[in-house]
Image (tube, helix red, strand yellow):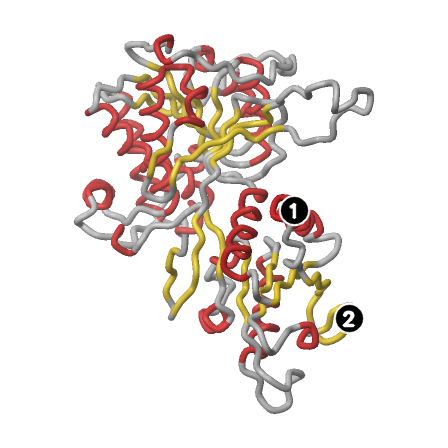
Amino acid sequence: MNGSKHFLGALLLLLLLSCASSQQVVAPVVKPDEVTHSPAPPAEAEDTLVVHPADSFRLKDHYTIALILPLFLDSLREISDSIPPSYYADSEMGVEFYLGALLALDSLKKNGFRARVYVFDDANTAERLRDIAHHPAMKHTDWVIGPIYNNNLRLMAEYAKRDSFYLISPLSPADNITQKNPYYIMVNPGVGIHCEKLFDFVVSHFAQDHIVLLFRPGVEQEYASIFRKLLRKYHQDTGNYGLQFTEVNYGGIMQTDSGSLALLLDSSRNNVIIIPSVDKAYVHNLARDLFPLTRPSEGTMAAESYRITVVGLPVWGDQSVMLFEYVNALQVHFTSSFYVPDTFYSMNNPFYREYVSRYYNEPSEYAVKGFDMVLFFGKMLQRYGKDFGSMLTAVADTAFHTQFRFGLHLDESPASPFFSADTVQRPVVIQYIENKYLHLLKYQDNYLIKME
């Protein structure tokens, strides 16, 4: 079931050639090498989201949609048996997303969805992306998925704001891609949503325990400040000031600013350690340092064992840097935008069965995401037309790897000092639209289980 990357490259080219001569909904991949583009920068757009009455949606007989993926077709054209499989590593993500998207388009077509689909290869370069942005098809697009990488995503977001088309960011959790842009849709929640999920989980399950906020000043300081803000809001909303965090500055080697790490833990209670870090090497070192405290042996710095529950960001789910022995002993809980149960990988699952039958390979995370996103946004376009964005916050849907529960990410910067908050109502400014749903996962007996 583990097909080589040679196979993926050859398969992609075959698919593109077949699309070019068929009546299918998918158009051939477009590489706009000869498109002339204007050097003028995108103009500013209004940061408002127009909500249309239910009976006023502009439905059409067919739509125009686009996928912008890092396929690196220039390299794939040079297929040779002498090239090692690692040659296609850069193309793998885009190819797999595209293969999942193809199955979603087939499903949409069976339900009456008609669209002209353009697949662009941006090769993760700004020059190629500018050509794509000025391709004639982009003047009529109803939504765009991609680019994948932040630099090109940031550039395309400005074109989306200028030209008023919805741009769907499929993978990036970055919250600094664009500003005041109601046409930008984040499928992968930003770090603020992750922190809120972790905070709510800790408060509802571990309020009586010893809670430690552990971070490196200047590195995780921004993320730590989110937890401080959430704690202040909790105090104001509930009046319960008894819930507090013990903040620990920890760089490693079992020592903190206040001495030994063990001295800051409570042997009589469970120690819930919140670690707001996305640094793989750092969290691995933390796991290595904390693990001995759960089962100290003679000669260690800890004289007794401690009950520890680690709560962290998605990096804790990366098994390439984390040992099961560590995460089991430390009762690691973490947030994730992607989760499928073991039953997903079964011939009883129609999507899995169709994917394996067509591509002779198991669907990767990117293939699942490609399917889920194209299917969901295709259905939204079919149901609500070009103005589907105004309905995103009112619609909830369950996909294979997540749930789509969108909300508005509003501008929370301080109000202007020239106006009094008591006399002037501050206007609502939409920064972007963001999926608010996350999984809360836990390691247990070498298995990953879903908590929430």
Residue visible at 62% across and 22% down? 428
Residue visible at 51% across and 54% down? 201
- Where in the figure is residue 332, as x and y percent of width and height? 49, 64
Mark 1 surroundings within 10 Å by alpha-carbon count, few (fewer than 14), some (14 through 19), many (20 or more): some
Please identify the quarter of the rendering in which residue 159 is found.
Answer: top right
Q: Amino acid at mark 2?
A: Ser
Above/below status of 53 relative to 240 = above
Q: Looking at the figure, which quarter contains the N terminus?
A: bottom left
The residue to which callout 2 is attached is 258
Q: Nearer the viewer, residue 190 or 24?
A: 190
Find numbered disc 1 in the image and state the secondary structure of the residue it sits on.
helix
Q: Is residue 74 visible?
A: no
Above/below status of 20 relative to 55 = below
Q: Amino acid at mark 1?
A: Ile
Mark 2 surroundings within 10 Å by alpha-carbon count, few (fewer than 14), some (14 through 19), many (20 or more): few
Q: Is residue 309 visible?
A: yes
Residue 141, numbered label:
none
Q: Nearer the viewer, residue 400 or 54?
A: 54
Left or right side of 59 for 196:
right
Left or right side of 396 for 148:
right
Q: CA gap, disc 2 to disc 1? A: 23 Å
The residue to which callout 1 is attached is 226
Please identify the quarter of the rendering in which residue 158 is found.
Answer: top right
Sequence-first tag of 2 and 1: 1
Residue visible at 32% across and 21% down? 27
Left or right side of 71 for 411:
right
Q: Residue furthest bottom?
A: 298
